[in-house]
Image (cartoon, grey):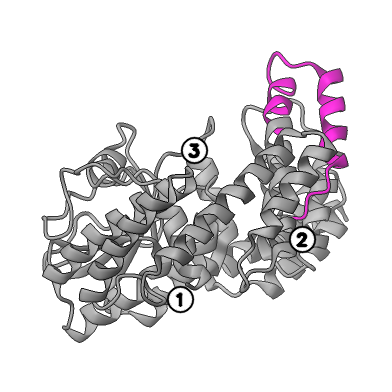
Amino acid sequence: MKRLAVLLLASLAASNLNAAPIGIGDGAPALKISRWVKGDAIPSLDSNKTYVVEFWATWCGPCKVSIPHLTELAHDFTNITFIGVDVFENGDHPDALVSDFVKRMGDKMDYHVGMDTADKFMADNWMKAAGQNGIPTAFLIHQGQIFWIGHPLALEKPLTEITAGTFDIEKAKQTARVIQKINAFYSKAMKGAGDAELVAEGKEIEDLDQKLGGVLPNGPFNSQEVIKQAKFQSAVNAYQRAVVAGGNEAEISQLEAEARARTPKDADFDAIKKQVLDHAEGAKADAIFTKYKVAVGANGDPAQAAELGRQLQGLNLKNSQELNEIAWAILTNDSIKQRDLNLATALAKAGVDVSNGNEPAVLDTYARALSDSGKVADAIDAEKKAVDVAQDPAMKSDLQATLDKYQASADKTK
C-alpha cells in the first residue's frame, strides 16, 4: 500500500466512527462565515454550482501540507469553487492570527478563505454533524448535496468524476461505509488487537473493497499491509512521545530501534526521524513561547522573559513557518507589552536562512523586525527581496505597499 493511502488512514482514524446526523447524499448545511479573509464573500451555496468546503486551522500541521494541494486543484478545476473554513482556532486573537497566516501563505493558498462564527456554527453543523473530528477535512458539495467527505489529498478523483458527470453517489455511500470499517480496523491494529480478530475482519473488508473496485486512492485494501503500517505508526508515535517528553537516552534509543525495525520498505526512516526531531523542537518552542507570552504581558516578568527568550534562541528550529510565526507574534501580538526586537530579528533571520530566502512572508517579517529596530535601510533590502520572490499578485502588491512605506520613512529621515 502506498504511503498516501496510509497517510489518509492515519488521519481518518481520528474521525468519529459512530453514526452521524449528516452524510453523503444529504443536503449540505448552510454556509455561515463570520469574516472572509481572502477572496470575494460567498453569502450562500448556490444549488446549481459545485463547491469544495475544506476545514483547517493555523495550528494544524497536516493542514499546512494540504493547502498548496488544494490550490493546485482550484487552479485545475476552475468550474468548482473552493472554500477554506478556519475552525477550532486557538489563541487570544484569532482574527489577526488567521489573517497573518493567510497573508504569509500567499499564492500557496489561492482560494476563498473564511472564518467560523463565534458560536462555531460551521464546526458544529458540518464537521461534528458529519462525525468528523480531525482536520483537514473536505466536503464536496454538488447541486446542494453532499457527494463526498474526506481528506483533501484524496479529492482529485471525485472532482474529476464530478466534472465528467460520472460520479456515482450510491457507490460513494457504500464507499463511505467501507472507509468507516477501514478506519475502525486501522484503529484496532494501532491499539494492538489480536491477530485472529484482525485477520477475520481484514478479509471481510478486502472482499467489500474488491466489490467496489477499490475505495482507497492508491490501490486495493490489503489488510496485512495495513496491520504492518498501523504497528509501524504506533511504534513511531511511542518514539515521538518519548522524544517530546525528553525521556532518557536509553529509552529513546530503544523506541527508535523498534520503530526502525518496523519501517516499511518504501519508507525512509531517517527522514521520519528528522520529522520527529523537528516536531519535538517545535513542541518545545510552543511550550516555551506560551510561557514567554505571559512573561511579556501586562503583568509579566522581564527576567523570566529574558530567560525564555534565550531558550527559544537555543532551540534548533528548522521550520521556517514556525520561526516566522513566533517572530511575527513578538512584533505584532497585542497581548505582548514588552517587545524584544533583538529576539524577533534573530528568529526571523533564522527563518530566512532555513528557507534560503525564498519565502516572501518570512522575508517580510524579517524586514518588519529590522524596521522596528530602526534599521530602515536593511529593512528596505529585505522587503525588496520579499517583493521579488512573491508570486501571488495580491501578496506582491501588499509587500510593495510595505516597501513603499519603508522607502518613504527613509526619505523623510534624509
Magenta segment, which residues?
289-318
Q: How far apart are marks 3 and 1 (CA)?
A: 26 Å
Instruction: Please report whichever mark, 3 or 1, sits nearer to the chain's N-terminal start.
Output: 1
Which one is in front, 266 or 46? 266
> At x 15% / y 43%, what residue is drawn?
21
Q: Which circle marks residue 94 in the picture?
A: 3
- The residue nearer to you, when weighing 213 against 153, is 213
The amino acid type found where label 1 is placed reads Glu
The image's mark for residue 407 is 2
Q: Which mark is residue 72?
A: 1
Counting from the top left corner in percent of width and height, residue 349 is at 83, 54
Q: Is the magenta stretch mostly helix, strand or loop?
A: helix
Front label number (2 vs 1):
1
Q: What residue type is labelled 3?
A: Pro
Q: Quadrant of residue 163?
A: bottom left
Mark 2: secondary structure = helix
Label 3 or label 2, whichever lies nearer to me, is 3
Answer left or right for 13 relative to 174.
Answer: right
Q: Which mark is residue 356?
A: none
Q: How far apart are marks 3 and 2 (CA)?
A: 31 Å
Mark 3 burial class by Cα count in 10 Å: few <14, some 14-19, many 20+:
some
Looking at the image, which is closer to me, 128 or 95?
Answer: 128
Residue 313 is one of the magenta-drawn residues: yes
Instruction: Specify the quadrant of the image occupied by residue 80.
Output: bottom left
**Circle 3/circle 2 CB separation < 8 Å:** no
Classify mark 1: helix, strand or loop. Answer: helix
Which is nearer the N-term, disc 2 or disc 1? 1
Q: Which residue is drawn at 44% across and 68% down?
A: 5
